[in-house]
Structures are given as structure tokens and as C-alpha cells.
Amino acid sequence: MKWLTLRQNSIAIIVMTVFLLFFGILAINAATSLRDYPADKSLLATALAQSYPVSIVITLPALMGAFIAAPLISKEIENNTLQLAFTQSITRSKWFWDKFGTLFILIVVVFGLFSISQHYFYLNAIKLTNAWDWFDIQIVVYMAYVVLAFSLGTFTGLLIGKQVPSMAVFLVLFFLIRFALFKMRAYWFKPLVSTWNFIGEDPEFQKGIWVISTRLVDKLGNPVTVGLKQLGCDVLQFQVGDVLSTVEYDCYQRAGLLMEYIYQPIERFLHIQAIEVAITLIVSILSIALMLWILEKRKR
């Protein structure tokens, strides 16, 4: 059964491995470039780091879940071979672990090796950039989503029993979970609030700060909604694209305004990661437990 499972999914595994190898090489190359940047060129380092396709990298577990995990059992149901498997001498739980467990171990090993390259990039990126920007590719978080994608994808396939609908439903569920956890990430701990008087370094560019939101306030903390013209500034003088200029900061300073920052400090980074990893692993374990229960109760 183990070898059969590997042979049935060999093409998908090879394609997945090629993708991971490609992005792994990109990560190592980008990390090496960042490693050579001096500390006084953090803006250039940030631009280089942000050119790395993190948004694609964090979708790779979802693609694995859709094209490998979701069809794993749904294909058996759709082809009417599941009942044949149940007539064999092995128990249903052993059949499940031979099929699910074999592929699960392989996926974890392959993605685990890939995540090492991402972690190497992460370690070099946080020296010059904001660690919060790389929250999702840190090895523990990334692997937690890999486990979630494989478990949830297989579970969705078992429930629906059709390959293509299973793939579509899984992608919707997976990204809904990711989106919900991303939104909650900022609020597991009550955000801190601080203000800046437009003198010195902008707190938003400090490496340990994750700025959730900003707003202009007066000295009493009331939000300010008037524009530059109402503050006595020449609007044309301060229009520099979409970026606030230091001259515009001077205008706000003369008006006695403050920039209020709502943020999470770097001290909470690992705690928030631990919460998110725990939730994804709980959902994964529940998915596996429900699959075992459904298979034992399933009549055909």
C-alpha cells in the first residue's frame, strides 16, 4: 500500500519538489545577498528583501493541499475503489495510515528541507529589516501550515468524495483560516499605543515594531481629519507622490499634532507565533481524528 500510494502520486510529488527546489535556491541566493549588505544600508536591504516572492512561497502549502492531499482519498471514492480497499485483510485504520501516513511523512520531510532555506533567508533578513515582515516563513509557522494543508486537504476530500470540488473547497477553507488567523494576529495581545511628534526617527521604521494602524491626533488624543491646507500649509508644496515628506512632517509639528501608532512589539513575536501554531495543529489533529472516525463508520 505504501509503494502504491507513492506511485499514484509520483508526478505530483516530483512537480512539487521542483517548485520547492526552485524557490529554495531563490531563498538562499537572496539570503546571501542580504548577508553582504552593511548595516547602514538598511533601506537598500529592505528593497532587496521585499523583492523575494514571499506571497508565492506561503501559497505553496495550499497548492500541495489542493493537488496532492485533496485527491488522496476523494480519488478512491470517485473511482469506487475505496470499498474494494475495505474488503482486504487490513483494517481501515491501517489502510488510512498506510495511505495518509506515508504521504504525510514524505511531505513533511520535503517541506521541512525547503523550510530550512526559508529560515536561512529569514535569519539574514531580520538583521536589516523588520522581523514581522517574515512571520509566515519562519520555520515553525511555515511547517504548521504545511501540516494543516495536508490534513485539511485530505479531510475535505474524504467528506466531498469528488476530486475537483474537494480541491476548490479546500482552497477556500484554507485561505479563510489563514485570513482569520492573520487578522487575529494583531489582537491576541492588546496592542500598545504610542505617539510621535515628528522629531527623530519614525517609529514605523523601527525593526522591532509591527505597526497595525496610524492616525493623526492632537495633543489631547483626538483624531485630526483636516488636510494640509486647513493647517495653513501650501498643499502643492507638500505633494510628493503618496509619501509624506519631511516638510509635511514640519507642518504637522508646527500645528502641534502627533502621529499615533497602534502596534505590537517584538517581545510578543514568539508568543503570537506559538498561539497561531497551536491553533493550526489543533485543527490538523481534529481533521485526522474525524477522518479516522468517518472511515470506521463508513459503510461503503
Image (spheres, grey):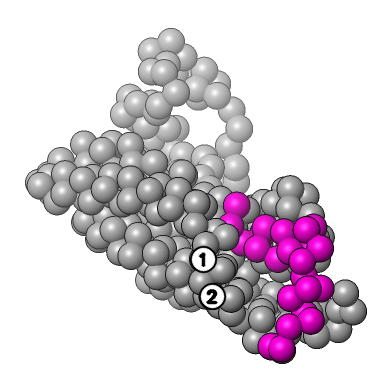
The N terminus - image quarter = bottom right
In the rendered image, the residue lying farthest to the right is 299
Look at the numbered discs 1 and 2 and tell me whether their residues touch, using CB distance below 8 Å: yes
Amino acid under disc 2: Lys
190 lies above or below 129:
below
The C terminus - image quarter = bottom right
Q: Percent x, y for residue 111?
A: 41, 63
Q: Please say whether residue 74 is one of the residues in the magenta stretch.
A: yes
Amino acid under disc 1: Leu
Residue 6's label in the rendered image is 1
Dominant SS type (magenta): helix
| Residue 280 appears left or right of 48 | right
- Depth order, front residue of 291/42: 291
The boundaries of the magenta stretch are 67-90
- Residue 183 is drawn in which quadrant? bottom right
In the rendered image, the residue lying farthest to the top is 236
- Depth order, front residue of 281/205: 281
Q: Residue at x 54, y 75 (%)?
A: 2
Q: Secondary structure at mark 1?
A: helix
Query: What residue did someone put label 2 on?
Result: 2
Mark 1 Cα-neighbour bin, 10 Å: few <14, some 14–19, many ≥20? some
| Residue 146 appears left or right of 282 | left
Q: Percent x, y for residue 14?
A: 43, 53
Q: Residue at x 78, y 73 (%)?
A: 84
Q: Secondary structure at mark 2?
A: helix
Q: Percent x, y for residue 85?
A: 74, 76
